[in-house]
Amino acid sequence: MKTLTVFTTLLAVSAAKKCIVKPKANANAGESSEPDNVLSTDEDSNDEPSNNGNEPTDNDRAELVEKARAEGKLPSDFKWGAATAAYQVEGAWKEDGRGESVWDHFTHLYPHNVETGRPGNEDSISGNVACDSYHKFDEDIKMMKIMKANHYRFSISWSRLFPDGQAKKEEGKWNVNEKGVEYYNSVINKLIENDITPLATLYHWDLPYALHEKYGGWLDYHSQYDFANYAEFCFEAFGDRVKNWITINEPWVNCVSGYRLGPGKAPYRCTGEAPRKLANETEGLDLQGGCSYEIGPSQYSPESEVLEANRPPQRLEDVWCSHNILLAHAQAVKVYREKFQKEQKGLIGITIDGEAQIPWIEPGMSEEQKKINEEYANLAAEFRIGWYSDPPVTGDYPQSVKERMGKDLPEFTEEQKAMLKGSSSDFLGWNTYTAHWAAPVEGQTPPTPEEANFENSKRDMWDDNCRGRGDGWTCIPPTLGSQAGSSWNTKYPPTIRVGLNWFSKRYEGLINNGIVITENGCAQPNYKVSRANDEVTKAYFESINQPEYADTYDEDMIEREDNLNGTLIHDTYRIDWYKGYLENLRLAFVEDKIDVRGYMAWSLVDNYEWENGYETRFGMTYIDFYNDPELTRVPKDSLTFLGEWAQANIQDF
Ligand code: PNW
């Protein structure tokens, strides 16, 4: 294994010396009988009496943090666990009254959009069965135990609770699918019985299909109200036990991949680039892809006219999806704060994704050029991350995004800004996987106010790990870090530290309970994607004196389906990944004094990796999806490694 060097040369690492959080008074656990499972909120800070002896006070926490830092460890209240999402693991897609989600609908309608699978076997290209966690959740808990998880992040399937997506309470009674409620009650109760704190995501991409058909789903302004009603039900039904809520998972991926980038993610609208073509590059299915025209009559805004059904994808659908989904997040938080939080004493926030942006460096580069690249890295981060993380923290889009997008960016009203502001101030969830380089594009100038629009907004900057030379699926080198098993999934551990510093500096004093890493992990490298860039990557990292990031791998490190007892279970590449990222997280906490409060590894089990199907394995647990009807859980070495890491690096663990 490589020795990790402290990452000192790149963006912002040394800049932020302060915590973002000066935690406000920590409140009492009230009447709860599970103090470990209860977290305080900012709102509680004026409550009296402030402490019943079960919960740490402000000073207690400061002490705990200081003590941990002195020992070079994470604090004892660190949230440690793994993550999954409903559609990727549950299966049981039409059992017990569950309604269709967009993923059910579109995988069945466009099987060719999924890259791997067994021809003719519908279950191999969809989440119909997946890990069957609907019936095998006890087995999943056993895996959590191996990694010594004290938290588990799962998501709730909206259409399992409300098959048509529309939650209504009439005369005190919800129109809910009781079987769905039973299932989530059992998940939550089993976790708590096992001393694992539930961290529930309300939306992980599986929009009820009925809402897509009715009004175009997230394209419609009214989606926010349907989401808030569904959220309200969840708070009411589960909030006595769930004290950690994530509203939306990765609005960027949901909207950009689902509504612009082609047939990658349901609902497979491609408003921008040409559909990807993978034919001949994969075994199994031919990937022909396809783009969906399906949609119901839809409104883009409260004022706009009703658009015709089944219209071709329109320009800016991803931008409008993003706008509406951010509002949906804020509406749900409003409901929680107004009706539940005081009594339930939980925390709520959003999970955003996005690569930290690393200023491009080259041997012999001038200080001036480095500075320019740093500026562009920040600009790129404002577009990639701030677009989604600013509104729920500061109440509006970043200034740079507004200026460069011009009229193409919808505006929030004053009322909406007030509702958004602080809606992720309890904590901010960040999914982090990889990093992108950033620098200006030579010869390009920023758009003038007259030229400001979606197409021009980024014309003078690149923020791509393919250095702007990507060609659909294949990333042309140099990539940033070694290539794991998805095209975008490259290993560059300092990215987590760079990103944590970026958030910390940007939102200083605005987030009360820190940042939680809600996903981080890698797919097993395979021949298809891991080899192409090795030599170029190696040469590049050597040229900038970072040879440790130029890892190319030996034959025996490459995981193959036919090597079940070898690399698939002895997943050294994945262990190396976790080692690197966790070390950088530890350094961000101990040395940079960043308030990072949790880490959820993606993923507990191999699962349905969306358009990649079942052959892209992110899990720390192996499942033989094609041959084993029992879907037996087989722990990989990384699962044990994580448990050992936690024991060594979290205080009093
Ligand atoms: C996340 N990217 O998605 C999701 O939250 C998970 O459901 C998913 O399984 C996991 O990461 C692994 O893919 C991402 O292109 C998808 O940078 C794409 C990107 C990042 C995250």
Image: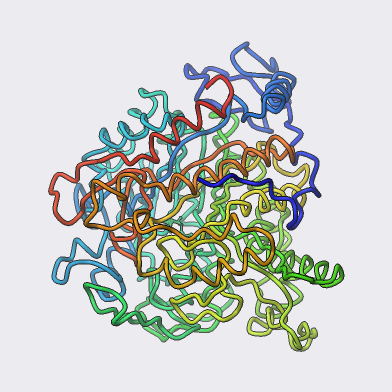
- Observer-nearest residue: 358 or 323? 358
Task: State how the image is colored.
Answer: rainbow
On screen, residue 335 above or below 26: below
Q: Residue furthest right?
A: 368
On screen, residue 19 above or below 255: above
- Observer-nearest residue: 345 or 226? 345
Residue 336: % across, % down:
55, 41
Q: Residue furthest top?
A: 53
Residue 631: % across, % down:
19, 46
Q: In which image quadrant can residue 128 be found?
A: bottom left
Task: Say left or right for 531 vs 14.
Answer: left
The residue at 79%/46% (across/down) is 16
The residue at 67%/43% (across/down) is 425
Residue 628: % across, % down:
14, 49
Task: Say left or right for 643 vs 579.
Answer: left
Q: In which image quadrant can residue 304 be found?
A: bottom right
Q: How many marks?
A: 0
Task: Say left or right for 631 vs 621.
Answer: left
On screen, residue 640 above or below 572: above
- Observer-nearest residue: 263 or 160? 263
- Observer-nearest residue: 209 or 399? 399
On screen, residue 500 above or below 106: above
Task: Say left or right for 163 vs 648.
Answer: left
Answer whether residue 192 is visible to the viewer in this image: yes
Residue 394: % across, % down:
73, 54
The residue at 40%/81% (across/down) is 276
Answer whether residue 412 is visible to the viewer in this image: no
The residue at 65%/19% (across/down) is 56
